[in-house]
Structures are given as structure tokens and as C-alpha cells.
Image (spheres, rainbow, N blue to C red):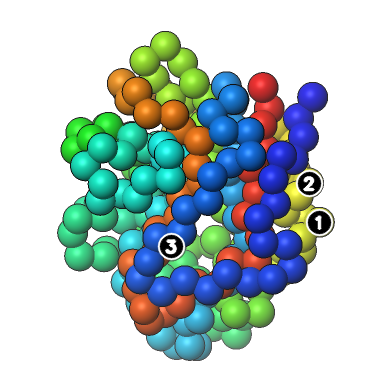
Amino acid sequence: MAAITEVFTGDRQLQLGREQYIRPLVIGSNWNKLRVGFRYTMHIPRGSNATVTMAYGLTCQSKQWYDANADMVYTLYSETGLNAAPTYLITNQGTYGTSNFLRCVNQTKVGSTLNTSAGGTNSTSLCVSITTRGILATDFTRGSGTITTQAWGRNNTVPTDQTQADFLVNMENESPPFLSTTSMPASSALTYAGTGLLDSFWFYWSNQVPLINISDIAVCRFY
């Protein structure tokens, strides 16, 4: 039976600007299928654009992305990757302060070797602003020499604030009631030959302006 195994930040907010955030999992590497997700807002003034790189997923032994020995699997919002200039465009436009997101990919990293999925499509309906919190999540499933990934998001034509209750019910249901795979990369099995234990949550945000506020981070083990 699926169960929430961890909630890191509760009602508090974690504010990040041009940094990585890493926390070990209580369950360590004892999983075959996990969902990693978070609830967040962005400080994008109305009528403004920003170009950022964002990524989140799992790393081994609390290692950060630039560690030469880091084995990782994650969802990456960027056209060019973490080593290049940010290219993920977010905009705050219109009455509701919606943020529009360019496409994302899923990726594994073993040392310096990267394996990348096909990209999703550009989305104009993943809505989040300072006052409307959004949810993003990704499923990671172990295989023989592979990890299968499936990214999820909340697609709205009108922004809807996602409560903590919304977040938790979408994390613990294998078929989440509010989340969608629309605009996300197709589910794919990525080559993963890493020997490091994927036992830590990892988040990356490229910019000091704008900042990202994270209200909740959770990990759900399905089996």
C-alpha cells in the first residue's frame, strides 16, 4: 500500500536562490518505485519574464550535481542543461499572474555521463504565482540497468491554489487525481549504470532573481 514516507518542510517555506538543496531520505535506498514532489511559488512580478534552470530528483549519498562521482536521476527544466546558461522561460502575465513553462526532460547522470529522455512540449497552462501554489512531481521506477521516469504537473487554464491537502493526496495516489502528464515527457526507461545508492532528495535552482519558495517537499514509496 502506498504511504507518505516523508514531509520535509510542512507549513514553512524554503526559499532558494542560485543553489542546490539536498536532504537524505529516511528510507535510504530501500525502494523500487518512488514519487518525489513539491509545492511551490515563484517571485515573478506581474508582466515580467525570467529565464532559469530548475531540476529535482534523487542523488546518491547527498552528493551535489557538480560532484564528479554523483549518480543521479532527475527532471530537468532546461533546453541546454545545468552546465549552460539558463533557458527555461517563465512569465507572469495577465490577471491571474500565471507562469508559463518551457518544456522539461528527464535525465540520469552517472559521473559525467548523461542520458536524456525526449522532451515534453512547451506548456502555457502550468499556473503558479506568488499567491497560487503549484505542484510538480516525478515517479522513478527501478529496472534492470534502467530507471523509468514519469513527470507530473497541475495544468490549469485558470490558476488554482494547491493546498497542502491537495499536495498530499496527489503524492500518495499512484494515479493522482489532480496531476496530469500533459506537456510532460513521455514515460521512458533511461539507462542507469550507477553504483551509488539513490538515497537523497535533490533540488536545483539557478537564479538569485527570481527566487523560488517551496512550501512542501514529500517522497512517497509505492513499492
Residue 13 vertical position relative to residue 61 in the rendered view, above or below = below
Q: Does residue 136 sit above or below 60 in this rendering?
A: below
Alpha carbons under labels 3 and 2: distance apart: 24 Å
Label at residue 103: none
Q: CA distance from mark 1 to mark 3?
A: 24 Å
Residue 68 placement: quadrant = top left
Tell me what residue is drawn at x 37 percent, y 29 percent. Answer: 196
Residue 1 appears left or right of 205: right
User: In which quadrant is the N terminus drawn?
Assistant: top right
Which residue is tagged 3?
101
The residue singled out by tag 2 in the image is 169
Q: Position of residue 67 (x, y in %)?
A: 26, 46
**Is label 1 or label 3 in front?**
1
Residue at horizontal 31 percent and vertical 49 percent from the top? 65
Mark 3 or mark 1, which is nearer the start of the sequence? 3
Amino acid under disc 1: Ala
Secondary structure at numbered mark 3:
strand
What residue type is disc 2 on?
Val
Q: Which mark is residue 165?
A: 1
Quadrant where the image shows the C terminus = top right
Q: Secondary structure at mark 1?
A: helix
